[in-house]
Image: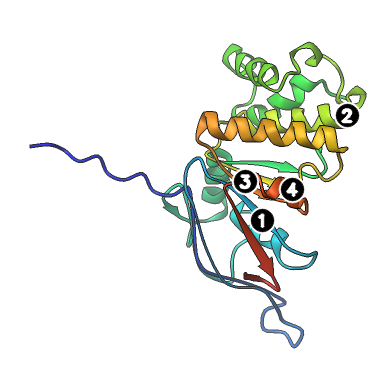
Amino acid sequence: MVELTPPIPPVLVLRGICKSFQVGLPNEVQVLHDVDLTLQAGEFCAIMGPSGSGKSTLLHLVGLLDRPTRGELSIAGEQTTGLNDRALTRLRGDTIGFVFQYHHLLGAFTALENVLMPMYAAHGLPTPEMHARAHELLDRVELSAYEHRQAVHLSGGQQQRVALARALVMGPRLLLADEPTGNLDSHSADAVFELLRRINREQAMAVLFVTHNAALAARCDRVIRVVDGRMA
């Protein structure tokens, strides 16, 4: 009898997600309205929308940095409803990487030390394996020659590539990129985008890429537009 391999669950599933602030107060405001979204392994999805449309709120929910008011959210097949803060922190650290518009590097630390930071937080003192992983990632983002240079002395494009290596160091299944090219010149923006795309394909990592750049969005697998807190 042939054993069937169970299907791999989507990396991300949102069902009827709503988010309100000031709940129960006269000034309560609903920011997200019944959002449904499924993201498969290896899918590169752009999210576009005007400022104030709810894109950042959506990314915070997907990144488990906030909780929805209503609806269901699953990451890598694990339903997050009912998980306590400790379990959410574990799931976030194990499965999600973040790259922001502002790289949030520690300027006085080297590129290598910045990439190692998530490992320090998760495991304490560094091991040879941790260093090997960080070296490998800096090589992949073409910064091995700069690994001992302080972040403050790197260019904007180089700093964003260090931030990408840092986001990948824990081996996430989902990468959330919030305007990662927004502060870069066109050449650096294109280089960072192509690097994201290449790693996405090589590792079958799902990517949510928030951007206002229509040309970059057109190079993604699909584009989702958020208007007034709803998927358009």
Tell me which corner region of the image, top left, top right, bottom left or bottom right, holds residue 24.
Answer: bottom right
Q: In this view, does 42 lie to the left or right of 113?
A: left
Q: Return the residue found at the far bottom.
A: 26
Q: Which residue is drawn at 75% across and 29% down?
A: 161
* Dot 2: element: loop
- Name the amino acid type tagged 4: Ala
Q: Return the residue found at the far right.
A: 153
- Name the amino acid type tagged 3: Cys
Q: Mark 4 points at which residue?
A: 215
Disc 2 to disc 3, C-alpha distance: 32 Å
Q: Nearer the viewer, residue 32 or 90?
A: 32
**For marks 1 and 3 on the same chain, the one whose residue lies earlier in the sequence:** 1
Q: Residue at x 60, y 11 (%)?
A: 128
Please tell me the numbered disc located at residue 107. 2
Q: Name the residue under label 3.
A: 220
**Other residues around mark 4 within 10 Å, as few (<14) / some (14–19) / many (≥20):** few
